[in-house]
Image (spheres, helix red, strand yellow):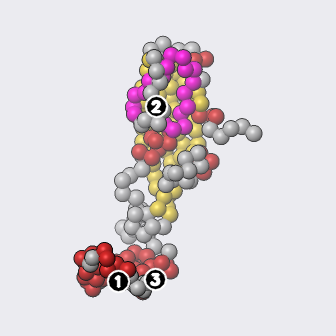
């Protein structure tokens, strides 16, 4: 059985000078190589264009597709579009730079013969995700979030008594925290938990 990720290792020393293209499709299998990632599924196409010269490599990453992620508003999973292009320069030197350093310029030792693109592809795909991740709006301009969850969260935010209770608890001493924590759960949180 082939070791996972080997297809992302490019043996550039065996290539003559010129331009090369590689197409990758990223899905669950790719993202499983990064178990700590918040992204564990996707449908992303990445075109890698590599210009090879004696001085180094110029690599262009063209990214298009969708990533599965949690909505910032309602918490439900949805597919968010990613569409971006990044360039990375690879120079040759006496020592290789850390491959985990996300940078647009890296250094490879003259003794190296290959480059593993998997980490760089992953970093660029994640950089392509918008900072605010919410369900897109429908044709009426209404976000496609779960209305029950959004409504329950809205009820919590609008409840002034809840805010007052929170402020009171914040002002209490740490020594009294055990006495104040009776194990009772606000029924509104129970309602929200049941929706999730």
Spot occupied by residue 175 in the image (x, y as percentages of width and height): 31, 77
Q: Secondary structure at mark 2?
A: loop
Range shown magenta? 103-120
**Crowding at mark 3 (Cα within 10 Å: few <14, some 14-19, many 20+):** few
Quick one: SS at disc 1?
Answer: helix
Label 3 to label 1: alpha-carbon separation: 19 Å
Q: Which residue is mark 3?
A: 190
Q: Secondary structure at mark 3?
A: helix
Q: Which residue is denoted by mark 2 in the rendering?
A: 98
Query: Which residue is labeled 1 in the image?
Result: 180
Mark sitting earlier along the chain (3/1): 1
Q: Quadrant of residue 142?
A: bottom left
How dense is the environment of label 1, judged by Cα within 10 Å: few (below 14), some, or many (20 and up)?
A: few
**Mark 1 or mark 2, which has the lower sequence index?**
2
Which one is closest to the eye, mark 1 or mark 2? Answer: 1
Residue at the far top: name it. Answer: 54
x and y percentages locating residue 111 in the rendered image:
54, 17
């Amino acid at each position: 059985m082939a070791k996972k990720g080997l297809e992302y290792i490019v043996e550039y020393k065996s290539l003559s000078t010129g331009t090369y293209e590689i197409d990758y499709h990223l899905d669950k299998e790719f993202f499983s190589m990064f178990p700590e990632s918040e992204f564990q599924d996707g449908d992303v196409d990445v075109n890698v264009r590599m210009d090879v010269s004696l001085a180094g490599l110029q690599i262009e990453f063209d990214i298009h597709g969708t990533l599965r992620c949690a909505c910032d508003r309602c918490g439900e999973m949805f597919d968010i579009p990613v569409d971006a292009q990044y360039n990375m320069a690879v120079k040759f030197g006496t020592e290789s730079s850390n491959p985990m350093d996300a940078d647009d310029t890296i250094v490879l030792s003259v003794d190296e013969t290959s480059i593993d693109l998997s980490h760089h592809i992953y970093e660029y795909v994640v950089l392509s995700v918008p900072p605010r991740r919410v369900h897109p709006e429908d044709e009426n301009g209404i976000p496609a979030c779960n209305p029950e969850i959004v409504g329950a969260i809205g009820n919590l935010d609008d409840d002034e008594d809840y805010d007052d209770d929170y402020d009171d608890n914040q002002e209490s001493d740490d020594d009294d925290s055990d006495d104040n924590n009776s194990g009772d759960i606000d029924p509104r949180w129970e309602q929200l938990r049941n929706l999730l």
